[in-house]
Image (spheres, coloured by chain):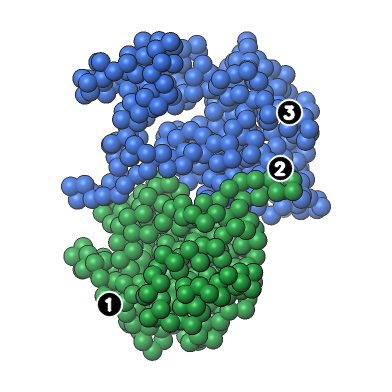
Chain colours: A green, B blue
Amino acid sequence: MRRRTLGVAALFVFAVAAMAEPNLPSWHDGPAKQAIVQFVRDVSDKQSKYFVPPAERIAVFDNDGTLWSEQPLYFQAVFMLDRLKAVAPDHPEWKDSPAYQAIVLRDEALLAKVGTKAVLELLAIANTGMSTTEYDETINAWLKTAVHPRFKRPYNELVYAPMQELLSYLREHGFETWIVSGGGIEFMRAWTESAYGVPPERVVGSIVETKFELKEGAPTLVREPKVAFVDDGAGKPVGIYRAIGRRPIAAFGNSDGDLQMLQFAAIGDGRRLAVIVHHDDTEREYAYDRESRIGRLDKALDEAKARKWVVVSMKDDWKRIYPWETQ
Amino acid sequence: MRRRTLGVAALFVFAVAAMAEPNLPSWHDGPAKQAIVQFVRDVSDKQSKYFVPPAERIAVFDNDGTLWSEQPLYFQAVFMLDRLKAVAPDHPEWKDSPAYQAIVLRDEALLAKVGTKAVLELLAIANTGMSTTEYDETINAWLKTAVHPRFKRPYNELVYAPMQELLSYLREHGFETWIVSGGGIEFMRAWTESAYGVPPERVVGSIVETKFELKEGAPTLVREPKVAFVDDGAGKPVGIYRAIGRRPIAAFGNSDGDLQMLQFAAIGDGRRLAVIVHHDDTEREYAYDRESRIGRLDKALDEAKARKWVVVSMKDDWKRIYPWETQ
């Protein structure tokens, strides 16, 4: 029996150690990590005056630029453009379309001339009209073949290792982790479970209209060329309300599109956490904020300073960026 | 050690017995219960050729008429009408409104004359304009005071005991249980967790537009008098796609508004379950189907027969209807 008792004691010690030492190996032990860990302790310790029951430990994460990279172009935009080229043979009429030519030739002057509306209309044609199942297959096929121009890897390998660790750490402490992104819901659901452990029903995103029908007897949802909801900016708290129905106590973002989500989660009674991932690492990833067209971080950075939110420096707070880097 | 071994053996036997005997005490041991239990065994037994991994064991339930009563008028409609009367003092202009008079006097002839649109507009004024938090408080207050005209009990006590048991039984077998209802999402979320063990984030329903703002510095969602999504009929598979992102393998409904949801879940490869709760018990609840204005069951009943879906007779399959009845 002694051996068993020792074993139990060892397990207990190990468990206490696990509580004390968060499993965040890709994080430097700086102020950002310390603030996050202190918050998690405060809300998950039953003795704490800030204790929050597990059901209310809702943490929401933006995706593009917060959980994975978004430069030089939102990865979903790359997919949609690739899709446009892939279906072009079915659309001989596009040959004479200035919008199509501008996109394929990446002709900025022509793009400016034809305007956003014409481009979006073409993208809508290329990315709707099929069933949701068929569209999911094209996403999965694309993920297997497309590679990032700089890192020469599939796009879904460009996820941030420190954030993967953080998601697991939060779930181990009773949090529900949700993705709340301006990206298309179907594009994320294809890979968020394997990349982040976030299942489809915990993904909130922008959506197009879908129409239910029995197609040759089979239940089918057909994608329609009409936007149903844009989950960005002031839309994010709305998306959270619709999908979750509780106000989060923690939010993670990286751009002005996340400002209202951060406000929604972080302003109010009790212990709350708002975190901004700041892209300041040209060498290992990218550096951009107030002037960027992609993932602009301007107002939210001011607000973070004013409200003392946590700003994570990718350069200084993260030992590595991607899971395939050695630590 | 012998005692411990016996204890373990006893536990094992108990566990097997628990698997063998579903905890559904309010169900008669008829064909409906047997079909449901057989389905659950087929998809949750690892040895079964119909085995489904837990993450894909999605079960969706309509609410009105499937999980609780809906006669003589949808309970949410009663709430909204009560709310109209409650805020009438703030709207002296309604005194001369034929729509308001028709509603308050329950004057059917006048109601027909003023039309649905005028009535809905009044209801929209009474049920929007405030924050979601304020509106939730009015729902909770109403649930504490309003009583059903026939059963003289709070409305949220008129839930079906056999369905409560069924929800627990499914969850014990690894299912995610979701509510997918034409009712307003906020009206259900106020009480579905205590009544059914279904938390807010597992409730899909109709929604009005909400607008995010900082109101005196506090993050607020304001209800707007505009419908954003109607989660009924062909809208139900759409609502499921948006919120869950997986096709359910089991669906439970009671009316034609559930037909497409039942089709969406039940038609296809693998083992699938569609169940219709048939209201045929005048004595203990209500009896209605093809001719009813509330919860009409006509096309879905034909489809159930054609596709051999399970039709539950409340009269013959349920030992009791409500939790407060003795068995």
Q: Position of residue A18 (x, y in %)?
A: 46, 67
Name the residue carrying label 3: B302
Residue under disc 1 on the same chain as residue under disc 3: no
- Residue at x-position 34% and y-position 36%: B225
Q: Nearer the viewer, residue B215 or B164?
A: B215
Amino acid found under the numbered disc labelled 3? Asp
Output the chain of dot 3: B
Image marks 2 and 3: residues in contact by CB distance under 8 Å = no
Q: Residue B172: which numbered mark, if any?
A: none
Q: Nearer the viewer, residue A121 or A176?
A: A121
Image marks 1 and 2: residues in contact by CB distance under 8 Å = no
- Residue at x-position 25% and y-position 15%: B96
| Callout 2 secondary element | helix
Figure quadrant of residue A175: bottom left
Query: On screen, A281 above or below B105?
Result: below
- Residue at x-position 30% and y-position 49%: B212
Query: On screen, B82 above or below A46?
Result: above
Query: Marks 1 and 2, how far apart in space?
Result: 51 Å
Whether residue B81 is visible, yes or no, is yes
Name the residue carrying label 2: B266
Q: Nearer the viewer, residue A92 or B26?
A: A92
Output the chain of dot 1: A
Task: Give the tally of numbered discs.
Answer: 3
